[in-house]
Image (cartoon, grey):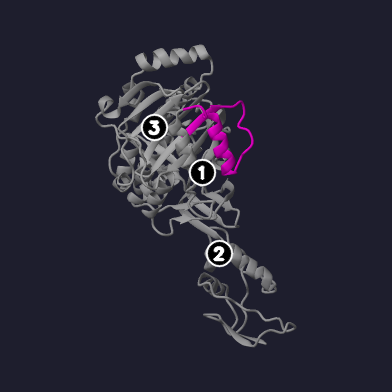
Amino acid sequence: MVTTRFLGWPTLDSLSLLISHKLCIGIANPEQPMATSSSYVLFLKSPRSPPSLTTPLSHNQSWFQSRMIRRTKPISTVLSVIKAQTNLRKEDTVIVGAGIAGLATALSLHRLGLRSLVLEQADSLRTGGTSLTLFKNGWRVLDAIGVGNDLRRQFLEIQGMVVKSDDGTEMRSFKFKDEDESQEVRAVERRILLETLANQLPQDAVQFSSKLANIERSENGEILLELENGTRLYAKVVIGCDGIRSPIAKWMGFSEPRYVGHCAFRGLGFYPEGQPYEPKVNYIYGRGLRAGYVPVSPTKVYWFICFNRPSPGPKISDPSVLKKQAKELVRNWPSELLSIIDLSPDDTIIRTPLVDRWLWPAISPSASDGKVVLVGDAWHPMTPNLGQGACCALEDAVVLARKLANAIKSEPASVESALRSYGSERWPRIFPLTIRANFVGSALQWENPVVCSVRNNVIIPKIVRLGPLLEHTNFECEPL
């Protein structure tokens, strides 16, 4: 039999103390035979007689400020009260989403001396996906937050780009340094970028398995976040970095991102003995179809195929089917592309619909609503045609962090003004880039044979200049 000995009657603060130290309380059932053992429940500061028990606390009450209730409450109710209180927390700044935007924002705040809690719905960093291209504006941000050199050592610097037709004919080539001496282009594995950012944060900065279930504003202006696991958090500032399908953006009144009419396959070719390609971006243009590949590291090559489709179609998770579909699209194209696809591990191949959201002035909601603000894809999803999605998310992170840190340190009452200032500063940059990326993608997805012939024989070889196309990568960013 289990012998349970109560050493004094519990007070509610002592119960809280026990739970906070994760002690286990065993309550024996006198009618249930059990293995012989002895368990003690020690209640600190116990009075000689049982005290009254307390009601659930509001978010701004302590255990010692609670209102007393009758002691006839059953023990199950008391334990429910205690459980509810242990699931209620208060945080100054909560970031929803541990993607590139969320981790970069958290690290930017950390560099400025501000703690934040990052909530991630997955049970670990979402390191799936392939690679992304970072231009000099992205690298300036990574340098500002102190991780640029760690990443440079792992990825090749891309020297230029080559544009070919679908039969392999070279139409044009460029060298980035010829157009802009300060330009820096590297393809970076998403997994390594996320891990590098996360490793610079305090150990308890990211809380996994924390999917947002509800968000609402409390009477005192704080934001209540309710998670699917039952946890409730009151936050003074909430930063939505929860991606393209952001629940926080939806709560703020933003429309769903719009499908732009084409999808993309992506993958990462693996060459354990070393990949054979020069450090250049290789583009191949067809009719309603384009592809490209770029070396990422000495052993990996990123590739993509973009194709027109009237609707996104059903989601396909079987990587062998994805690989087969990708190869079928470019079966008569240059052989090196097919070789890279063949050498791509199944778990690196994905297919996604391309979407964006145009932030029309006076029509779209602002980037912030009170003390809730959006960063990256949650605010301004854009197509990848300019390679600026991740770069702009990184820019957002440092701009917001500086403004928020200055407001909190100087005058906390000005936080809402700081968030509005962030939106006002970023919108004139984000809106034109989103539209430009869309137009470039649409032009490159032309299907009309006459238009494609003009593009391949006139526009690309004789008219296009790379310099003006890269002016958007100019972004000044001082170290934090």
Percent position (x, y) of residue 462?
35, 14
Where are the magenta residues, as a range? Answer: 304-333
Q: Nearest the camera: 338 or 402?
A: 338
User: How far is the residue under mark 2 from the one under mark 3?
Assistant: 40 Å
Q: On the image, numbered disc 1 is attached to which residue?
A: 242
Q: On the image, numbered disc 2 is attached to which residue?
A: 86
Q: Nearest the camera: 43 or 48?
A: 43
Q: Determine the secondary structure under disc 1.
A: loop
Q: Which mark is residue 425?
A: 3
- Local packing at callout 2 (Cα closer than 10 Å; few below 14, some 14-19, many 20+) is some
User: How far is the residue under mark 2 from the one under mark 1?
Assistant: 26 Å
- Say how many tags the image has: 3
User: How far is the residue under mark 3 from the one under mark 1?
Assistant: 21 Å
Percent position (x, y) of residue 330?
51, 29
Identified by mark 2, the residue type is Thr
Q: Nearest the camera: 400 or 126?
A: 126
Percent position (x, y) of residue 65?
54, 66
